[in-house]
Amino acid sequence: MNIENADLNLLKALDVLLEERHVSRAAARFHLSQSAMSRTLSRLRETFGDELLVRTAQGYELTPRARAIQQELEFILPRLRALVRGGEFDPATSTDAIRVNCTDYAVTVIGTRLFPRLFEQAPHLSLTVEPLSPRTYEEIEHGRVRRV
């Protein structure tokens, strides 16, 4: 894929498609018709040279390439939003997604004080707390996760 020929507006649609794993639900969330989202999926498949979503008996499944893209989008999209917004961070209006990887002990000690204050200051923020895993360290090494 050549970045000069890529439609970066498709990244948000791709993010929703990969999260929902269902064309109709993704279309509803993205305020498109089901047929328009199907066409968007076709364009994304062509752009990335991958099926991305594969229909199975249990519904749609992500291809390995789609899973890798999804992890990258978790890192890229918030930065693109910040770039467009001018880099100004306003916690009161931020709809950013933050993922915290830590031990249960850290959640108990730090989280019980930090998280309520965080949501008081940034009520629209999306917070996910996940346990530390070998994948966490791989993501740090590859620059997909920042350490604080």
Image: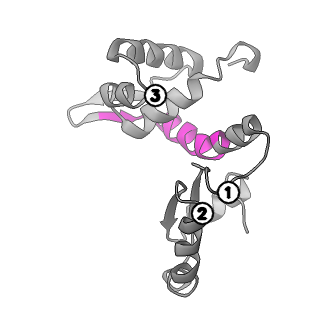
Q: Residues within 10 Å of mark 3 (few under 14, many from 20)?
A: many
In the rendered image, the vertical position of residue 5 relative to residue 10, given as above or below: above
Q: Tell me which label, 2 or 3, sits earlier in the chain.
A: 3
Question: Mark 2 is on which residue type?
Answer: Thr
- Quick check: 134 above or below 54? below
Q: Is residue 100 or residue 83 the one in the foreground?
A: 83
Circle number at residue 145? 1
Q: Residue at x 55, y 71 (%)?
A: 132
Residue 137 sits in quarter = bottom right
Mark 2 vs 3: CB contact within 8 A: no
Does residue 61 appear to the left or right of 139 in the view shown? left
Q: Quadrant of the N terminus?
A: top right
Residue 73 shows which numbered tag?
A: none
Residue type for callout 1: Val
* Residue annotated with mark 3: 52
Dot 2: element: helix
